[in-house]
Image: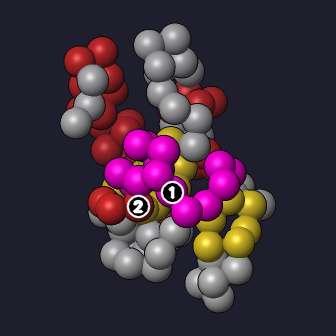
């Protein structure tokens, strides 16, 4: 659930449109496990200090499609991958944004 200071961003038209675009770009496939993606993850964690910076908050290169379980694991620090990497469709560890 979004933090109080981030709720207006996540309700914004710009975010909703970009989120849909990212899910389509990634063919609704989780970058971590290959399951159906339902969430879009910010590679750089949003904070009150950077949420209004479109180069961070709305940068497609910094957004990743994930399933709910993988998104939860990453945001809680329980991912199997080192930060900045994901398993590609062939099961190979791959740097993000490459």
Residue that extends furthest to the bottom in the rendered view of this protein: 90
Q: Nearer the viewer, residue 28 or 72?
A: 72
Residue 96 location, quadrant: bottom right
Residues packed near mark 2 inside 10 Å, few (<14), some (14 to 19) or many (20 plus): many
Residue 28 horizontal/vertical position (percent)? 39, 72
Q: What residue is disc 2 on? A: 70
Tell me, yes or no, if residue 93 can be seen here. Answer: yes
Q: Nearer the viewer, residue 78 or 89?
A: 78
Q: Which of 72 and 61 is in front in this view?
A: 72
Q: Is mark 1 on a helix, strand or loop?
A: loop
Q: Does the magenta stretch include residue 49?
A: no
Q: Residue 79 carries which label?
A: 1
User: Above or below — where is 35 with respect to 71?
Assistant: below
Q: Is residue 83 magenta?
A: yes
Residue 98 location, quadrant: bottom right
User: Above or below — where is 87 with respect to 22?
Assistant: below
Magenta stretch, overall SS: loop
Residue at the image position 62 percent from the left and 30 percent from the top: 55
Bounds of the magenta segment: 71-84
Marks 1 and 2 sit apart, C-alpha to C-alpha, by 7 Å
* Marks 1 and 2 in Cβ contact (< 8 Å): yes
Residues packed near mark 1 inside 10 Å, few (<14), some (14 to 19) or many (20 plus): some
Residue 97 horizontal/vertical position (percent)? 71, 55
Q: What element carries label 2?
A: helix
User: Is 73 placed left or right of 55 in the picture?
Assistant: left
């Amino acid at each position: 659930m979004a933090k109080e200071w981030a709720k207006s961003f996540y309700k914004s038209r710009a975010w909703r449109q970009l989120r849909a675009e990212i899910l389509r770009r990634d063919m609704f496939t989780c970058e971590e496990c290959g399951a159906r993606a339902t969430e879009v993850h910010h590679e750089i964690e949003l904070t009150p200090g950077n949420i209004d910076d479109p180069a961070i908050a709305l940068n497609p290169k910094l957004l990743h499609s994930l399933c709910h379980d993988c998104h939860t694991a990453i945001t809680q620090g329980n991912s199997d991958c080192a930060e900045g990497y994901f398993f590609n469709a062939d099961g190979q560890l791959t740097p993000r944004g490459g």
